[in-house]
Image: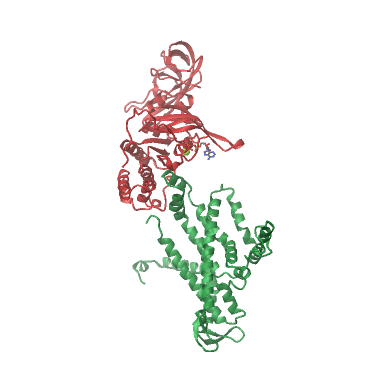
């Protein structure tokens, strides 16, 4: 057995580091830049997620880490060693493919054994590890089935076991849950988290589902058009989106125009739709005109007219079971959505077509880079 | 016959059922007619011919005789009536078998990479490559064979070029050899190997190759453990499509092999033509059929048994 991967998160070397990695497909007029100087540092034993809309380059980045593609510029380092030019079969990195890519002519157990056999492990050890992997993904009862004859969720688990069996330093998962129905998906999310904890392997997980990213990840990199826009923990990404794209891609967001009245150190007083509000200004964000992000659930509704609250007219209410969305048009014409949890007892007292006030919670407004 | 399920059927159901049966018989009539007149009928006639005596000039005399079958393997001396093995026939059997096996092998060696090449082209280009592969089919077999002859004969292109370059000072005897027949057959049958392998390769999911590389497989491992087992049905089909007609090949050995490189097909033709021994020709035809059938059973069995992960 290989020694278990060190779980020391203070390890000085990141598991995977991308240094200004650029990938250009094609040449001349057909050239397409899929990745634009992407730099990332992924820690040992981390559940790291690449999140972004379709076509933003997530798969491309994974394929570069796996070794199926070579970077056009920049380097990829594994525990400090430059692996940019190693072929995939020489990298201690395994992939769970979006299509699973299980070998259809082999059984479940033979699929799981494949990598171990190629590494020349002794027979007894292979059998042993395969047994353990089958238990880990709860597939013991189907080990002699052909993989073409098992369900989607089962295939997904076999793909996972097959990639985990050789004990890679890093496991790459390309939207492994996207083919599953919602219920199975939730189950597998929990199972993936558990497996990552039990094996101590670094997971790099790709998804375009922001909820999945928020619930599973230690850290998230939000990507758009071949660039990494922001890297941080789920809370940080959600509460402190760096720019307009991140704010709109993750969760629902209101965008409000604001003018800087005065600044004092990192804080500023702003005029937002005629209301004076204090907010923190992140580095590099300067007035006089700003765009502020405001999450719909960070608003409290009240009777119109009180000082310090945004004023507008209630246009519509939409009932969502656990909460209700209030669509408001502010006095300067900006649309605003407020999300309020439904109380079990009382109906709300606001009428469509009448004036209404919406008070942001303290520090709920986020100034955005443009 | 009277299963319970039959007894519980209502009359309407019965009527619908027999209508369905009638319809299915009606629909299979063309196939049945074809099988009767194109396959079993001729076969029975040939079988009958093999058990009667030869006519004086040609044709047969309708009296029961084992002479045809006897002569497949043995000869009787005209003067002293001693029986001995028909050496000429045995060497023709052997030549046919070995030439067909080698043809299959050579077409496989060239056909597999060709099919792989086509299957890995961008989808837009593939029809063009397939089209190129099938171009030889457009020309008559005889013309293609004579074209090869033109290339390899003593005054042909190859010898002329080699002589002029001073690489040889005597023309190489390539025509009318075992090698020239092999070359001709491999050339003629190559598309029959490429097409079925391509068909199974086209359905092959090339992401499996990446999965293999990801799991530490070398190029050879990928070929041996992933590509070959999955496209095996195509290889089996291609090999059968090449081996079977090779065994009965007639034109190619005749044109490129001269008189010394006869194959079974030529021997059979000889009996129906100059030899005027139709029963022997018929018996040889049936023999060919049996050899093909045995080879197929053996081959398909072997192909199904062999499993690199067993
Ligand atoms: N081999 C290739 N040749 C040319 N362009 C490519 C190639 N592979 C990817 N691209 C392009 O690069 C861009 C990024 O592709 P990529 O597959 O990385 O997206 P993604 O973020 O994984 O998207 P999705 O969520 O849809 O899987 C896309 O616009 C795609 O068309
Ligand atoms: Mg993708």
How far from the left and from the top, in percent, is residue B240? Answer: 50, 64
Residue A1 lies left or right of residue A148; in this view the side is left
Colour chosen for chain B: green
Up/down of B303 relative to A199, above or below: below
The structure residue drawn at horizontal position 36% and vertical position 66%, both measured from the top left corner, is: B5
Residue at the image point whose x is 30% and y is 45% from the top? A132
Q: Is residue B124 above or below residue A174?
A: below
Q: Is A122 above or below relative to A291?
A: below
Colour representing chain A: red
Query: Is residue A308 in sight in this rendering?
Result: yes
The quadrant holding residue A137 is top left
List x then y, in percent, for residue B203. 50, 52
Residue pictured at 45% horizontal, 21% vertical = A354
Q: Position of residue B116 (x, y in %)?
A: 53, 52
Residue placed most toward the observer, A72 or A309: A72
Count of numbered marks: 0
Q: Nearer the viewer, residue A264 or B31?
A: A264
């Amino acid at each position: 057995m290989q020694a278990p991967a060190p779980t020391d998160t203070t390890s000085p070397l990141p598991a995977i580091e991308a240094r200004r990695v650029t990938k250009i497909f094609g040449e001349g007029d057909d050239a397409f830049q899929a990745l634009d100087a992407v730099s990332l540092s992924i820690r040992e034993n981390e559940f790291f997620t690449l999140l972004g809309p379709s076509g933003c380059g997530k798969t491309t980045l994974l394929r570069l880490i796996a070794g199926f593609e070579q970077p056009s510029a920049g380097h990829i380092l594994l525990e400090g060693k430059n692996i940019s030019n190693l072929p995939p079969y020489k990298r201690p990195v395994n992939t769970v493919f979006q299509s699973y890519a299980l070998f259809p002519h082999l059984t479940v157990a033979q699929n799981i054994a494949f990598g171990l056999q190629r590494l020349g492990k002794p027979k007894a050890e292979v059998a042993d590890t395969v047994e353990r992997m089958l238990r880990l993904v709860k597939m013991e009862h189907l080990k002699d089935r052909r993989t073409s004859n098992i369900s989607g969720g089962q295939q997904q688990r076999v793909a996972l076991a097959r990639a985990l069996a050789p004990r890679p330093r890093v496991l790459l998962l390309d939207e492994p849950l996207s083919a599953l129905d919602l219920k199975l998906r939730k189950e597998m999310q929990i199972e993936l988290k558990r497996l990552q904890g039990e094996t101590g392997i670094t997971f790099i997980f790709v998804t375009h589902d922001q909820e999945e990213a928020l619930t599973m990840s230690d850290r998230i990199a939000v990507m758009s058009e071949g660039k990494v826009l922001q890297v941080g923990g789920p809370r940080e990404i959600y509460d402190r989106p760096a720019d307009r794209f991140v704010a709109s891609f993750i969760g629902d967001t209101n965008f409000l125009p604001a003018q800087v009245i005065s600044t004092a150190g990192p804080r500023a007083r702003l005029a937002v739709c005629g209301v004076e509000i204090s907010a923190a200004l992140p580095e590099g964000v300067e007035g006089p005109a700003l765009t502020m992000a405001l999450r719909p659930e960070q608003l409290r509704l009240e009777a119109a007219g009180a000082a310090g609250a945004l004023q507008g007219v209630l246009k519509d209410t939409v009932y969502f079971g656990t909460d209700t969305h209030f669509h408001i048009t502010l006095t300067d014409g900006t649309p605003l959505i407020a999300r309020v949890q439904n109380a079990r007892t009382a109906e709300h007292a606001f009428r469509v077509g009448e004036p209404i006030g919406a008070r942001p919670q303290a520090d709920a407004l986020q100034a955005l880079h443009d | 016959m009277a299963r319970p399920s039959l007894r519980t059927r209502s009359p309407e159901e019965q009527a619908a059922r027999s209508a369905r049966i009638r319809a299915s018989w009606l629909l299979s009539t063309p196939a049945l007619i074809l099988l009767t007149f194109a396959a079993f009928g001729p076969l029975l006639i040939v079988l009958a011919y093999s058990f009667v005596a030869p006519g004086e000039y040609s044709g047969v005399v309708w009296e029961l005789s084992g002479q045809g079958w006897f002569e497949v393997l043995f000869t009787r001396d005209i003067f002293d009536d001693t029986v001995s093995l028909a050496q000429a026939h045995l060497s023709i059997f052997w030549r046919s078998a070995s030439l067909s096996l080698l043809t299959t092998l050579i077409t496989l060696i060239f056909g597999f990479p060709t099919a792989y090449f086509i299957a890995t082209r961008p989808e837009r280009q593939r029809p063009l490559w397939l089209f190129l592969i099938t171009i030889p089919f457009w020309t008559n077999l005889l013309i293609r064979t004579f074209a090869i002859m033109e290339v390899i004969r003593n005054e042909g292109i190859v010898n002329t070029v080699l002589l002029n370059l001073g690489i040889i000072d005597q023309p190489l005897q390539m025509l009318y050899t075992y090698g020239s027949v092999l070359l001709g057959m491999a050339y003629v049958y190559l598309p029959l190997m490429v097409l079925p392998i391509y068909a199974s390769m086209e359905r092959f999911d090339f992401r499996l190759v990446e999965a293999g590389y990801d799991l530490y497989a070398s190029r050879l491992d990928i070929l041996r453990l992933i590509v070959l087992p999955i496209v095996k049905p195509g290889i089996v089909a291609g090999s059968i499509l090449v081996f079977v007609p090779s065994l009965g090949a007639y034109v190619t050995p005749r044109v490129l092999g001269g008189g010394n490189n006869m194959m079974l097909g030529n021997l059979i033709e000889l009996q129906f033509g100059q030899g005027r021994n139709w029963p022997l020709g018929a018996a040889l035809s049936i023999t060919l059929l049996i050899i093909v059938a045995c080879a197929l059973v053996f081959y398909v069995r072997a192909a199904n048994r062999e499993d690199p992960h067993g």
